[in-house]
Amino acid sequence: MNQTTETELSPAQRRHLKVRQMILSVADRVFARDGEAGLSIRRLADEIDYSPGAIYKYFDSKQALLDELKEMFFERLHEELPEFDEADGDYAAFARLSVETYIRLALEAPHHYETAFAGTSERKPVELDAAAASAKERAFFGLYEMIATGIQRGVFAADLNALHAAKSIWAASHGLVLLMIHFPNFATAFDDDQAAPVSPDAVIRRHADFLVRGISA
Amino acid sequence: MNQTTETELSPAQRRHLKVRQMILSVADRVFARDGEAGLSIRRLADEIDYSPGAIYKYFDSKQALLDELKEMFFERLHEELPEFDEADGDYAAFARLSVETYIRLALEAPHHYETAFAGTSERKPVELDAAAASAKERAFFGLYEMIATGIQRGVFAADLNALHAAKSIWAASHGLVLLMIHFPNFATAFDDDQAAPVSPDAVIRRHADFLVRGISA
DNA sequence: ATTGAAATATAAACAGCGTTCACTATTTAA
DNA sequence: TTAAATAGTGAACGCTGTTTATATTTCAAT
């Protein structure tokens, strides 16, 4: 094993990493506001007071930079997902909260979320090993384990296949996020109940409830 | 009202429409194969033996052309969705088939489908009038009516709000389509049952079943 | 039939994009 | 002190969507 990574870095390497981080942070800010279209290498170079070519000393391509932004986002999202509080004990409520939180966090960074799922990712044998996988895959693995645990606890239907259920729940949550991003009025669309108009929050809550009820015992 | 549109058109107008249609059809072919990135104005111009600028005599912008391709696709999709066969009588089966068909048709034209929901559409008061809406919105309206009818028939839960249910079902179906597009191995991902590996078809069927059971009485 | 207007198609150009490359200046290690 | 590695630049390449001036053709009305 290595020594602590920090002491092994030369001043040059530390400077390199520092600039790299600075670029990432500025890029993340611009990307969050204006999306992929608004984040051009030239504009990024302007904002960090470097020439466009300089960025390629830190990143292989714009795509590589974007990939890192997306990975960072999904790590943040994954970290902020709730953990089950044994003292509380309401596992179904925990499941609902997990789904709701996923959707809400995704909606807080629509450009990040949307781009993370844009296009077709290379066909590769998906990693069953949670440590080697991307943050996206690790998040799915967490969902899978949540459902498997719920089945063991008797909260979710015993005849359920945890893997299949996890895929359906993920797909369903994913879809709501993207529809709400695409249609700014998705929550209130077609709603003619002017006395009690539907809020985005209510739609999210209902959806999560619908999904968790669907797998409950 | 007008006379039959055909007789009113001058030869020049007919030629104009003909070329327009030809451009659309070539663009649709290229777009289906190579997506938005593969469909550049210059390449399209090459394929139809015109100069790039000529295309702008027929379309305001590339975006306008793409919008038309997407609209055309959703009209096709909408038309190919099944209708309920009264003689059959199994309404739940009809609902399952509708969801399955939507997903399958979407997956047949992944570029069309994905682009149709890319980005944020302009915030506008969604049309409740089915005739004035886009094919996308009309398809949703069909789903809404399917669920409302199912409730009336006593097939779906009586305490269900058809509008809310339609939104959840649409979101859930939409999500599965996009995940399957993004992960070519979504169906078989994480699946360690090497004796009976999961097929895309099975995932779609299970998902549709999950959703329809969720709203059934 | 002729004339004037409208439509068509083109080539060239503009501004922007991601990326590469030759080159200089600086920093690092021996 | 010297040689090698690194940082950063400005210019260029080839691409993009789009606009414009221009020449040509088509069309309708005199």
Image (tube, coloured by chain):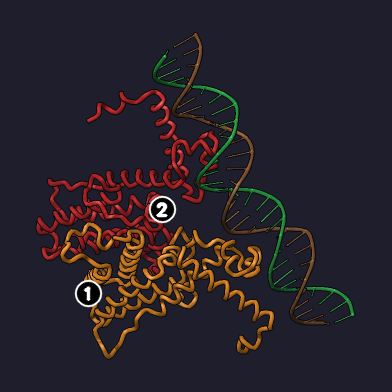
Chain colours: A orange, B red, C brown, D green
Q: Identify the subunit bearing mark 2.
A: B
Secondary structure found at label 1? loop
Image: B51 above or below D26: below
Extreme residue toward the bottom, this view: A87
In x, y percent, where is residue B189? 41, 66
Q: Identify the subunit bearing mark 1.
A: A
In x, y percent, where is residue A114? 42, 63
Q: Quadrant of residue A75?
A: bottom left
Q: Is residue B145 left or right of residue D26?
A: left
Q: Quadrant of residue B126?
A: bottom left
Which amino acid, by three-letter code, is at mark 2? Thr
Numbered tag placed on residue A195 in the rendering: none
Which amino acid, by three-letter code, is at mark 1? Ser
Q: Is residue A132 left or right of residue B193?
A: right
Residue, disc 2: B115
Residue, disc 1: A216
Q: Is residue B21 left or right of residue B50?
A: left
Image: B91 above or below B40: below
Query: Gap in Å between the C-alphas at discs 1 and 2?
Result: 35 Å
In x, y percent, where is residue A91? 26, 82
Nearest the viewer among B60 and B78 is: B60
In x, y percent, where is residue A44? 57, 65
> Residue at (29%, 77%) from the top-left corner?
A97
Nearest the viewer among B215 and A15 is: A15
- The number of numbered badges drawn on the structure is 2
> Residue at (64%, 81%) from the top-left corner?
A14
The 10 Å Cα crowd at callout 2, few under 14, some 14 to 19, many 20 or more, is: some
